[in-house]
Amino acid sequence: MVKIVIDYENCDGADCAECVDVCPMEVLIIEGDKIIIQNKEECSLCEVCMDVCPNEAVEVEDD
Amino acid sequence: MIVNEWCMYCGECAGVCPRCLIEVRESKLIFDPENCKDCQICIQVCPVRALEKE
Amino acid sequence: MYTSMPSKSIREGIIKGDFMIINTDVLVIGAGPAGSTAAKHAALNGAKVTLIDKKSEIGAPKRCAEGVSKDGLAKLGIEPSSRWVAKELSGVRLVSPNGTDVLLDDDKVKLPESGYILERKVFDKHMAMDAARAGVEILVKTIATGLKRGEEDQVLVDVESMDEKFQIKAKIVIGADGPESRVGRWAGLKTSIKPKNMESCAQFEMANLDMPYPDCIDFYFGSVAPGGYAWIFPKGDDIANVGLGILTTKTDKTAYQHLLEFVKNNPATKNAQPVELNIGGDPVGGMLKDIVADNVMIVGDAASMVNPLTGGGIISGMIGGMIAGKIAGAAIQDEDYSKKRLKEYKDKAQEEIGDSFKKYLKAKEYLLSLSDKELDSIADAFQDAEFESINTSELIKLLIKVSPKALLKLGKLF
């Protein structure tokens, strides 16, 4: 199972959305001013979201 | 990642690689395995299934 | 060790073997139609331009069905030539999964890819030759392997040409390096294509076809090509590009496997034989948002300048190239290569290309939402319609009658 955790304390939300732009599977999307996770099972585990996040607020893990 | 002999160097794999790890030359595919997270999107899009997981 | 090189041209430097950093105003990477057009217009606007292509032959192998519109060529100021027009066409035939077809005459419905079928091998070379005549220096079998910012507001591009490795110092780099573009990514642009926006395509050029309408381009919709469509684009009386594009998110088979099935089952191709196989990705997600950075612009397929509905990108890529080339030339005159200056390209491309794609993107979403059954019933209704007197809005009205969700998906777009 893929585990994706967004640390909302440190996430800049829709103002940043770098992870949303790069996610190849559209798992990370914008809802209102927040970044949310949809269709988690689609995640390809490429970890690009982790690379681009300026605040290290995304964590992707394959359990 | 294994590049099979029938690869036609069309570059579709390079276009979808989220980490930009594939360089396609006229008759050679150069892949950087070190930074690959094994997302396998490249394998999935290949029109002739020339790429394979190692 | 790199030493500064006084040679007049890169080729002279290669012959002399004194390597080297070569200076140029504008470096265009990729000599497809978009790159050659960009190079030509930059040179015509006074810049010193170098055009490189990684392949030994510009224009081959093609990764394309070769359709362009007559209006598109005219807009670019290009006179059609019998040397690279394989066939002139007069209409479009849309075929639903059960074989029901709808014929549309060119005078009544304008489609972006209908008009001429090109011989890309010749066409691409012709465009590069035009660039050469405008003063562009061209290097083939020469690949860019990296890009970094140098001093003096320029970029340094690592280049390999056969056994030579050198650097080209350019004020502006135009990345026309196709859907697999690396130039944009080197400059920090997000040009990776999501799998749901990348059509995986396979095509045979075939002979001995038996085409009922050899003057029409054929589109086949439905499960023959999940997430895309199949096509037969005639290049002669019994010659055609027979291909399809699929979304690999919608099928477990490869584009090639779908192509083999299509060719086996289509009456027109039952006895046809392939003389060429082409494959490649087609970015159909609409024009990219970020296509300029300091000193860098991306054009053509690299910038997803592709009609999202049809997948055609020759004309739109060339228009993008023309805009980029002209602005590169002007920016060189102004000695300003900043992102702020080059943003003019992005704005103009958005206006001329990107905005028009929005309705096609909606139309594609609608089309891909239709089941084989729905496609058949739409085709059925349209087949009986009197097209002589019907305009686009009446077409849409009829469509909504047969397929009510068209109203929701297409709204008042057309």
Image (cartoon, coloured by chain):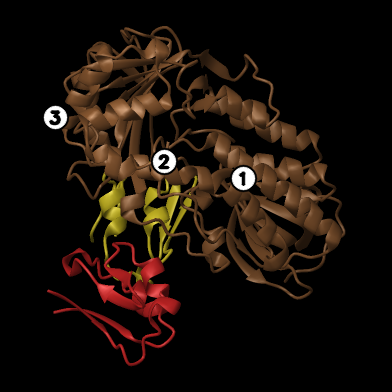
Which residue is label 3 attached to?
C373
Mark 3 or mark 2, whichever is nearer to me: 2
The picture quadrant where one finds residue A46 is bottom left
Q: Secondary structure at mark 2?
A: loop
Q: Chain of mark 2?
A: C
- A6, above or below C17, in the image: below
Q: Chain of mark 1?
A: C
Which residue is label 1 attached to?
C320
Q: Colour of chain C?
A: brown
Mark pair 1, 2: CA separation:
24 Å
Amino acid type, callout 2: Leu
Mark pair 3, 2: CA separation:
25 Å
Q: Secondary structure at mark 1?
A: helix
Q: Position of residue C114 (x, y in %)?
A: 48, 23
Of mark 1 and mark 3, the one earlier in the sequence is: 1
Residue C347, label in figure: none
Mark pair 1, 3: CA separation:
39 Å
Amino acid type, callout 1: Gly
- A1, above or below C145, in the image: below
Q: Chain of mark 3?
A: C
Q: Position of residue C283 (x, y in %)?
A: 42, 47
Q: Colour of chain A?
A: red
Judge from the rendering whether residue C231 lies leftward or rightward of residue C381; answer left or right: right
Amino acid type, callout 3: Lys
- Tell me if residue C273 can be seen: yes
Q: Colour of chain B?
A: yellow
Specify whether disc 3 shares its chain with disc 2.
Answer: yes
The residue positioned 22% from the left and 25% from the top of the image is: C378
Judge from the rendering whether residue C50 lies leftward or rightward of residue C177; answer left or right: right
Which residue is label 2 attached to?
C413
